[in-house]
């Protein structure tokens, strides 16, 4: 009975005449749900293999093996897929449904992905009467490659989103090393999965170099930023300067960002869900705090060079601290309230994963979509600063703020550029032929942002010391 129903539904899909393959999968899943099983049942149709079984309650590890013509709980000849299920799935005694199918070219094109679905193959997993998601122990789907992977492509494990009718990486990690003949998808929920061949804009060699540059630069910046905090604490004149108090808040935000970014990939490699949740949340908050304080640096520059503090702002430092630290806290709290599952594992390459926001829409709204406004505002403030620095009529007026020598003026402008985070704008040029060069510049300059700010602090300390010496000399000359 089930075999007859399968043929009636599946044949139109294979012939490319079914208008909605998503609907077809839902019908097939419904038929499988209603099929009675005692032990294990395996069915085979053209480009479709199905296995229905009820696991033994005492089973610790469940494994499924499938070829193009059969599927079972023991190894099969010409194996294409190997599935290893976690213990928590097999302990309930419920029917487990496995399917491996290949869409016709016309049906696959309706799914909505812009990349190639490897071998047009989908692997489906479900448990009768249950929605399996958020598994503490991930399950693995290992697929064999029958063709060589192009140097400009890399596999990405994704699941089929029935609602959006496209593929998504949420909840899945891709375990693969170039040259391997297999790829393993490690996921935390059941549905239909596929290996998407994603076109890569940079080579594997460049990815490794960029990763090394980023880790080295962020580590150096973290060390330099800590020294900057110590300089601020031990120097009384710096502590009395309002501008330096604003700068030190940005320094602290960048310290938090580096502290949570550097170990994020190691935390993602572990299976501890709560630790990855904390790391993702803290990394999101630190990034938003860094963006907020970059924007406040631009606002402070506006008051300094445009308003020239003509307008008195009561409790100025308190108010900017509320904005700089409070707004990111509100955004992160809203994300957690809406759905804490937005924080978790995210695969940024087949070999690298981090703990961050795993929902593309949330990431776009709360991070990627906010920075362009910060960048444009700070670019405007930087342009005003440049105009003031090199304006002949303003040199005397701003002589105590910026040194009149061109070299020192340029150094200070570079310091302002680091404080405003303008190098983050290089991300806008990471496309087309500019991708690889701009990514190198982006990684080098942004990972060293903290180090550049440290140099700014050193210059400020030297200026403070020179000013103190000059004041002392003038006092002595007057007394004589």
Image (cartoon, grey):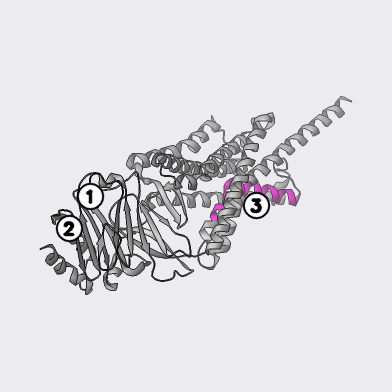
Q: Is residue 165 visible?
A: no
Residue 28 x, y percent position in the rendering: 18, 61
Mark 3 → mark 1, Cα distance in angstroms: 74 Å
Q: Is residue 118 above or below residue 83?
A: below
For disc 1, the marked residue is 55
Which quadrant does the C terminus fall into? top right
- Dot 2 lies on which element? helix
- Frontmost residue, 329 versus 283: 283
Which quadrant does the N terminus fall into? bottom left
Question: Mark 2 or 1 closer to N-term?
Answer: 2
Q: Main secondary structure of the magenta part?
A: helix
For disc 2, the marked residue is 32
Q: Is residue 442 above or below residue 117?
A: above
Residue 460 x, y percent position in the rendering: 70, 39
Question: Mark 3 or 1 closer to N-term?
Answer: 1
> Magenta stretch?
403-425
Tell which tag, 2 or 3, sits nearer the viewer: 2
- Asked if the stretch drawn in magenta spans residue 411, the answer is yes
Task: Count every numbered label the image shows and give the total.
Answer: 3
Residue 110 x, y percent position in the rendering: 28, 68
Q: Neighbour class for label 3 at 10 Å: few (<14), some, many (≥20)? A: few
- Asked if the stretch drawn in magenta spans residue 205, the answer is no
For disc 3, the marked residue is 387
Q: Residue at x 49, y 36 (%)?
A: 325
- Frontmost residue, 378 versus 359: 359
Res 155 quadrant in image: bottom left
């Amino acid at each position: 009975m089930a075999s007859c129903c399968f043929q009636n539904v599946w044949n139109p899909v294979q012939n490319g005449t079914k208008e909605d393959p998503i609907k077809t999968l839902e019908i097939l899943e419904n038929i499988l749900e209603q099929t009675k099983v005692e032990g294990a049942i395996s069915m085979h149709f053209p480009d479709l293999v199905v296995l229905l079984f009820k696991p033994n309650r005492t089973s610790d590890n469940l494994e499924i093996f499938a070829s193009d013509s059969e599927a079972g709980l023991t190894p099969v000849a010409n194996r294409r897929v190997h599935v290893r299920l976690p213990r928590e799935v097999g302990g309930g005694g419920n029917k487990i449904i496995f399917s491996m199918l290949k869409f016709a070219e016309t049906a696959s094109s309706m799914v909505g992905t812009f990349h190639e679905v490897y071998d047009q193959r989908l692997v489906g997993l479900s448990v009768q009467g249950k929605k399996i998601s958020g598994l503490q122990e991930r399950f693995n789907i290992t697929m064999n490659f029958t063709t060589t992977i192009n140097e400009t492509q890399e596999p990405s494990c994704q699941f089929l989103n029935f609602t959006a009718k496209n593929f998504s990486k949420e909840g899945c990690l891709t375990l693969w090393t170039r040259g391997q003949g297999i790829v393993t998808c490690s996921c935390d929920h059941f549905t239909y999965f596929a290996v998407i061949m994603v076109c890569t804009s940079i080579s594997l060699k460049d990815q490794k170099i960029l990763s090394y540059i980023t880790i080295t630069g962020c580590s150096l910046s973290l060390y330099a930023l800590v020294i900057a905090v110590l300089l601020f604490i031990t120097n009384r004149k710096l502590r009395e300067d309002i501008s330096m108090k604003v700068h030190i808040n940005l320094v602290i935000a960048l310290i938090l960002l580096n502290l949570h970014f550097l170990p994020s990939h190691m935390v993602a490699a572990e299976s501890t869900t709560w630790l990855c949740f904390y790391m993702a949340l803290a990394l999101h908050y630190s990034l938003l705090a860094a963006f907020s304080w970059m924007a406040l640096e631009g606002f402070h520059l506006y008051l300094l060079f445009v308003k020239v503090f003509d307008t008195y702002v009561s409790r100025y430092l308190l108010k900017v601290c509320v904005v700089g630290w409070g707004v990111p806290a509100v955004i992160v709290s809203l994300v957690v309230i809406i759905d804490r599952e937005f924080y978790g594992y995210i695969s940024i390459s087949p070999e690298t994963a981090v703990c961050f926001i795993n929902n593309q829409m949330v990431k776009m709204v709360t991070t990627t979509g906010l920075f362009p406004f910060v960048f444009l505002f700070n670019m405007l403030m930087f342009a005003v600063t440049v105009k003031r620095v090199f304006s002949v009529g303003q040199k005397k007026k701003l002589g105590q703020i910026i040194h009149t020598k061109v070299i020192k003026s340029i150094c200070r402008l570079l310091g302002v550029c680091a404080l405003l985070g303008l190098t983050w704008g290089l991300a806008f040029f990471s496309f087309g032929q500019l991708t690889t060069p701009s990514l190198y510049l982006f990684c080098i300059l942004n990972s060293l942002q903290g180090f550049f700010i440290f140099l700014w602090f050193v210059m400020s300390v030297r200026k403070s010391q020179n000013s103190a010496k000059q004041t002392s000399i003038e006092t002595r000359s007057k007394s004589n």
